[in-house]
Image (spheres, rainbow, N blue to C red):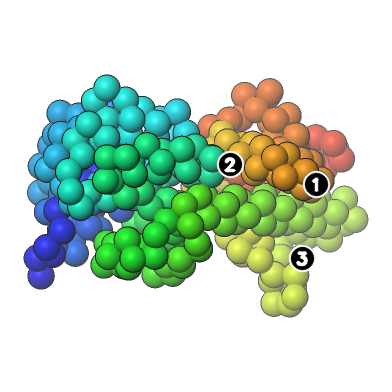
Amino acid sequence: MAQNERIGFIGLGIMGRPMARNLLAAGYALTVWNRSRPGTNALLDAGAQEANSPREVAKRSEIVITIVGDAPDVEEVALGEEGILHGAHDGLVHIDMTTQSPSVTRTIAERYAEAGVELIDAPVSGGEQGAIDGTLSIMAGGKRDVFERCQGVFDAMGTTIVYCGPSGSGQVVKLCNQVVVGLNNLAMSEALVLAAKAGVAPATMIEAVSAGAGSSWALQNLAPRILANDFAPGFKIAHQQKDLRLALELADQGHTPLPGTALVHQLFSALEADGMSEEGTQALVKALEKLSGASVSE
């Protein structure tokens, strides 16, 4: 069934590409722009139209979605010389699904307000598979009425869509999510190393603990991959580090101590120093293996 809103999509990487495909599958007319050709070509083959710049995407759309690298990338596609702002028109909404700084989000929203453009910050959780399956968790900040207008667009990409509050609130909640993800990863990795060092098969530990109060997404999904020596990224260390840095910056602004988050950030830094930035976040266990002299993978 065709949808009324014309959608623009900027950022056709690991996450953006399947998210855009799901919008096409839901019947939305889609105009895309990406810095590299592979992502663009994949969407053109699926039925999208191409624009020459973020500005042109905005001119041809009622809602523009972005999911790019970090705050500077969002600022460029939003406010740069060929940015969304310069394609502004009445009723335009920009949904930024990048995980980035809440303060930068609010700054962009203020600039947009002068031109009558609305910004919704709506970072996601669920990884590449969630993007493919359309089961992402979406955390949205901005004006509630604008959020409600975009509900159908969100429904095409996710299954848990939560309005979190004013501009920047979605980013704050996403950073809280990344704190929990990072510490769960550390807890899982420590349990694997402890089991191995104490002479218990890590696979046995996983089976037992997964059935009780100690279970977690990390234990059920990442731990088996570690045992299979599979460190391919569902989510890269480099990306996790960016998110943890943002969380620590936000915490510093409010003098909020996050000792566990700081520790995980430092352990990942050690892995980055060893050239592992492109590995999956389950490689956190390697830092603990190195410290303990243990090996948990099969």
Classify residue 69 as left or right of residue 178. left
Residue pushed farthest right? Answer: 198
Classify residue 109 as left or right of residue 4. right
Upstream in sequence: badge 3 or badge 2 = 3
Mark 2 crowdedness (10 Å alpha carbons): few <14, some 14-19, many ≥20? many
Q: Secondary structure at mark 2?
A: helix
Label 3 and label 2: CA atoms lie apart by 30 Å
Q: Which residue is mark 3?
A: 205
At a point 73% along the width and 39% down the height, the residue shown is 252
Q: Is residue 264 visible?
A: no
Q: Identify the image quadrant of residue 103.
A: top right
At a point 80% along the width and 35% down the height, the residue shown is 290
Q: Which residue is mark 1?
A: 257
Establish if 121 lies above or below 72.
below
Q: Position of residue 173 (x, y in %)?
A: 57, 56
Q: Position of residue 277 (x, y in %)?
A: 58, 30
Q: Secondary structure at mark 3?
A: helix
Q: Secondary structure at mark 1?
A: loop
- Of 67 and 199, the residue lying toward us: 67
Mark 1 crowdedness (10 Å alpha carbons): few <14, some 14-19, many ≥20? few
Upstream in sequence: badge 1 or badge 3 = 3
Mark 2 or mark 1, whichever is nearer to me = 1
Q: Which residue is mark 2?
A: 243
Q: Identify the image quadrant of residue 187.
A: bottom right
Q: Position of residue 183 (x, y in %)?
A: 72, 53
Residue pushed farthest bottom? Answer: 212
- Kindly check if marks 1 and 3 are in contact, taking CB atoms under 8 A apart as contact: no
Dot 2 amino acid type: Asp
Dot 3 amino acid type: Met
Q: Identify the image quadrant of residue 43.
A: top left
Mark 1 or mark 3, whichever is nearer to me = 1
Q: Is residue 217 visible?
A: yes
